[in-house]
Image (cartoon, grey):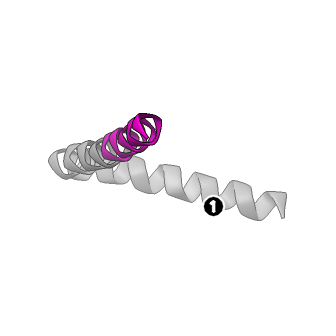
Amino acid sequence: MKLVKRIIVVLVIAFAAFYLITRPQDAANAVQGAIGAVWGAGVAVVDFFVALAAG
């Protein structure tokens, strides 16, 4: 099972490197989108707790 996990990790890293080298603009857009999604989720969680504290 460890071997399969290691192979999958290597393949994902290789694909990410290939994507970054061949399509840098698209890779940058993908990273920006992921960061935006994480940021939006964080803002939503903070808004939830603020509303919860306000009662």
Magenta stretch: give its range: 39-55
Name the spot of residue 5 as percent of width and height, x first: 72, 59
- Residues 47 and 34: in front is 47
Image-based side of 51 in relation to 33, left or right: right
Query: How many numbered tags mark residues here?
Result: 1
Write the residue at 19% across / 52% down: 26
Write the residue at 38% across / 47% down: 41
* Residue 46, quarter of the rendered image: top left
5, above or below 48, in the image: below
Name the spot of residue 9 as percent of width and height, x first: 61, 54
Question: Which quadrant is home to the N terminus?
Answer: bottom right
Image-based side of 7 in relation to 46, left or right: right
Where is mark 1, residue-wise?
Answer: 8
Name the spot of residue 10 as percent of width and height, x first: 59, 52
Write the residue at 35% across / 40% down: 47
Name the spot of residue 7 as percent of width and height, x first: 67, 59
Image-based side of 3 in relation to 43, left or right: right
Q: Residue furthest toward the left?
A: 25
- Residues 3 and 40: in front is 40
Q: Secondary structure at mark 1?
A: helix
Question: Which quadrant is home to the C terminus?
Answer: top left
- Residues 18 and 34: in front is 34
Q: Residue furthest toward the right?
A: 1
Q: Callout 1 environment at 10 Å: few (<14), some (14 to 19), or many (20+)? A: few
Disc 1 marks a residue whose amino acid type is Ile
Main SS, magenta residues: helix
Image-based side of 11 in relation to 3, left or right: left
Residue 44 in magenta stretch: yes
Q: Residue furthest toward the front?
A: 55
Write the residue at 33% across / 48% down: 34
